[in-house]
Structure formats: structure tokens, C-alpha cells
Amino acid sequence: MTLEQLIPDVVDLKKPIYGKTLNVEWLLDSLRSNDKIYQKLHGDRAVKDLENDIKSLKRVTFYDVSGGKGFLSVVLRCTVHFVDSTSANDVYHTILKVPGLESIEEASKKSDHDMEEHSKNRDQHAFLMESHQFECDFYNTLAPILNGPCPKVYKTEELIFGKKEGVLHMEDLTLRGKTISHFENINLSQVKSVIKAIAHMHKNILTADKALWRGKFLKNQTAFVDLVSALDSMIEPLVKKSKREDAFVPLIEKLRKFYSNKDYTIFAAQQSFADLGMAPVLVHGDMHSGNIMWAIDEDGNIQNELAAFVDWQIMHEGSPMSDLSRFLTHCCDGVVRRQAETFAVEFYHECLTKEFGGKNVPYTVEQLKKAYNYAFLIQSFFAVAVTQIFFTSFEEKLPNQAVRNAFHSAGVLKALHLLEDADRLLEGEMKAVFEKYNV
């Protein structure tokens, strides 16, 4: 006799979830079999559906909480109501992350830039299946090794288009964490929290069995290369709406050949750290504001501590400075980033040294600084390019035009500071790189 047969649910077990082929039965089975917290709190409680008793409000409900933040998935927050619930708060929340292209299509409709145009030569279904499988592999095999701030994943299903729907069933992090937007800022204490977490994960992967990961996750090293040719068309709407064309245009004209050169992006992502004699690590790959959840207090206010890094779909083997550069360029305004860059690399090395117990640290500060510069010269231009696209999705959530204008101005200045610093770097320490790839 199965657990479901023993528990007298009053629910339509075959009810699809959010119009998908996944149903309530699948969700309840996963909760009761895999989620230890659910097992402890609610393991033998029966679930009752809304359709069976509208007045009692005992049901399983679900809604999309992804809000367009994830371009490769829809995130569903599922709420389980019980037959014997004693109050409206006597429920259980859990998350289903379902891979899909809906968010890409929605963002493309809202954006001035045709996001689909530059992926027309890519088999999007194959890319989505591969990205989903990478994330499943990560949570099933690599997350326990990294032992970092990651969500608990209870069950994964592979995606096979036309045959099987993919899903990740995970804990509901909205109960203990929040993300911020590209246009909101963080502080230096939060920067240090992220650096500590990155160093901790790097130590764990560097000391793990290489057979588990080395050479198995290479493809996403160049995940953003296809977008290099699109950078100009992504940056153009920002410049037009910036009211700062006099500052932007000279920098863009000077740097356009460099940031449009795919050869540099490939070199920096695949080879630069190896040329510096640095061992690779496992890279998250997309450490922007929407993929970093900050801890919250009992009133829901964001704290300085991390709750989790989410969305590991494009994780890959790569430079130890890749995630740090993406984090600082995408999550900080120019003031915070420039301050952080005065200590970030040294602080990472200090944290890594502590993780290794003061011995056999695989990198020098000099190597790390050079690796950061290589990575910065990829991430800075991408951070500029996504500014207007992100704002198009963000502005509808703002209460009035004055607030919209303030956030947009902050985003414009953040982008301008990135271009200024990339220019300064290419005129100075990285001048040889500029001369080689500015063609």
C-alpha cells in the first residue's frame, strides 16, 4: 500500500499544475517522499482541494513568482492547504521550477531589442534541455560538494520536449530570502558576504575528486558569445534614453571594436586563466541581482547575509574570478563597485587562505588581479548592455514616473561608470589586450 493510499486526501490528484503536465499527485508524492521538513510537520495530513469544498479553502494552489526574472524557466510557488488546517497560515509552501521559453518571449515583447533575433540560429529547445540538465546535474551531484548557499532540491525530472516535462522541486526560499533588482544597490558588507561564500565553494571544488567535474562542464564557458554581436543593438536604446549621449558616444565609438570581438570573449572565458597558470573552478555563470537571494529578518527586511545563489543553469568550469566580476559589475553601482575593487581580490585571497588552513593556496594575489581584469572586460560590457532591457521589465513595478526616472538615472550612471573603468583599464594595465583585440 502506498503512502497516498494511507493518507485520505480529498483532492483531484490528476489536476495539472499551472496548465503543465505535472500534477498535484506528483507534487504531494515528492513532498512526502523527499522533503524532510514536510515529513516532520505534515507527513500524515490529508490535503483537500478547493473544488471539493469552496467554503473551507482547503486546497493546493500555485502561481508564477518568477516575474520575468528567469529567462529559462517559470518558478511556481505552490501552497498546500490541509483538511484539518486550523487557520489561514496553517499551510505549506514549496517551489517548482519548470524550464520553458515563456520568459524569453515575454521579455522580447517588452524590450526595444529583439532578443530572439540573435538566437535564431540556436536550437532553443535543445539549449533549454541542456541547460535544465546541467542544473539537475548540479543539484544532484555538485551542490553537496560545494556546500554553499544553495536551495535544497528535493527531486529533479529531465526535460524531453514532446515526451516529458522537466522540473526541479525545491524549498521555498521566499520565506527566508529576497532578491533585489539590477537598479537597487548593495553595501560593502554584502559584498564581503558574497566573496566569503565564493571562496568557500572554490576551496571545496578545488579539493574534490576531479573526476566528478573536470572536463564535464565546459560548454557554457562561452554561453554569452552569441550575444557579443548584439551588444551594440542592446546598448543603443540605453544611450538614446540616457540624456548623457555626450558622455556615452565617445566611449562606445572608441571601444566598439573591442567589445564586439568574439575572439576576446572566447579567450577570456576559456583560456586566460589557464595562461596565468590558474586551476579552474566551478562557475555559477550568471551571478546578477536576480540570482542572489539575501537573508531577511522577521519583518521581511533584507540583511547583509546570503540566503542562496539560485539558477545554476549555465554553471561551468572556468576562471576563479568570473563570478566575482559578474557580481560586482551587475550588482553594484559605480560607488560601491569602485570601493569594493580596492579590496575584493585581496579579501577573496584572504578568505581562500583561511579555507585552506593557511597552506597550499593555489593562487597568488597577482594572478587573481589579472584574472579579474580579464573577466571584468567581458562582464562590464554585458552589464551595460542589459541595463535598458532590465529596466523595461522593472519600470512597470514602480509607483510613479518620478521614481522611474530616479531608478533609470541610477542605471545610466552605473553603466557609464562601467564604460569609463573599462576604458581606463584598456588604456593602462590591459593596453596590450586592447591593441590585440580592438580589430
Image (cartoon, helix red, strand yellow):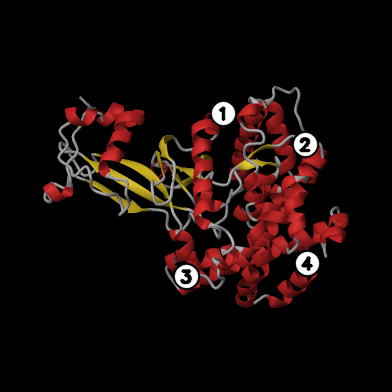
How far apart, in angstroms, are the residues tagged by discs 3 and 1? 40 Å
Q: Amino acid at mark 1?
A: Ile
Which numbered circle lies on residue 109?
Answer: 3
Judged left or right of residue 264, residue 312 is left
Q: Residues within 10 Å of mark 1 (few under 14, many from 20)?
A: some
Q: Which residue is mark 2?
A: 278
Q: Earlier in the sequence, mark 4 or mark 3?
A: 3
Q: Earlier in the sequence, mark 2 or mark 1?
A: 1
In the structure shown, which secondary structural element does the residue marked by tag 4 occupy? helix
Q: Residue at x 67, y 75 (%)?
A: 244
Q: Earlier in the sequence, mark 2 or mark 3?
A: 3
How far apart, in angstroms, are the residues tagged by discs 4 and 3? 29 Å
**Is residue 428 among what the camera can see?**
no
Which numbered circle lies on residue 257?
Answer: 4
Q: Nearer the viewer, residue 365 or 156?
A: 156
Q: Amino acid at mark 3?
A: Lys
Q: Nearer the viewer, residue 129 or 145?
A: 129
